[in-house]
Amino acid sequence: MEIQELTEKYIKDVALIESECFSRPWSEAAIAAELKNEFSHFYIAVEGGRAVGFVGVYALSGEADIVRVGVLPQFRRRGIARAVLRAALEQTAGDIFLDVRESNSAAIRLYRSLGFYDTGVRKNYYSEPEENAVLMKKDAERGDADAGAGN
């Protein structure tokens, strides 16, 4: 597996991942537009010549928001989400924020292991299905909780 920045070559792959992972997936056009956004940074995991996972980050004024994380279902539980997140975290300065579905316990555990902590709950934030969002933050000065764990 190789981690790299998103290029036009992999837009269709990321759109497929979106359709497999999200109830409201971004279109190919929306993903392509991110390549032109100076504040947007997408990192992909490439295996077998195709993107199998990705993370999207918006970075502006010394802080960042993780806006999307997705891995094809057949590639999950292999450390791909952790790898793309670590790549993004290494390239991102300042405090980092994200939100995650309250029921997504695997993602919440992953984020906590990377140094994120809960900052609140946004009621009924998600739709299809309706669900609360757990708001999380990683302070610029905090390291990974599992640094060196080999994951």
Image (cartoon, rainbow, N blue to C red):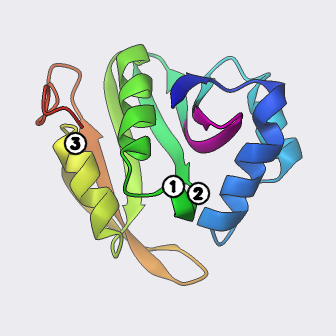
> Which amino acid lies under the numbered mark 3 shown in the image of this protein?
Phe
Decide if residue 123 is in sight here: no
Q: CA distance from mark 2 to mark 3?
A: 23 Å
- Vertical order, 86 against 77 (above or below): above
**Can you identify the residue that label 2 sits on?**
72
Residue sitting at x 76%, y 51%: 15
Q: Nearer the viewer, residue 23 or 86?
A: 86
Image depth: mark 2 or mark 3 in front = 2
Decide if residue 111 is in sight here: yes
> Which amino acid lies under the numbered mark 2 shown in the image of this protein?
Leu
Quick check: is 49 in the magenta stretch?
yes
> Which label is found at residue 75?
1
**Residue 127 location in percent, x, y?**
58, 77
Q: Secondary structure at mark 2?
A: loop
> Which amino acid lies under the numbered mark 1 shown in the image of this protein?
Phe
**Residue 128 location in percent, x, y?**
61, 81
- Vertical order, 63 against 76 (above or below): above
Q: Secondary structure at mark 1?
A: helix
Quadrant housing the C terminus: top left
Image depth: mark 1 or mark 2 in front = 1
Residue bounds of the magenta highlight? 45-55
**Residue 50 location in percent, x, y?**
71, 39
> Which label is found at residue 116?
3
Circle 2 crowding by C-alpha within 10 Å: few under 14, some 14–19, many from 20: some
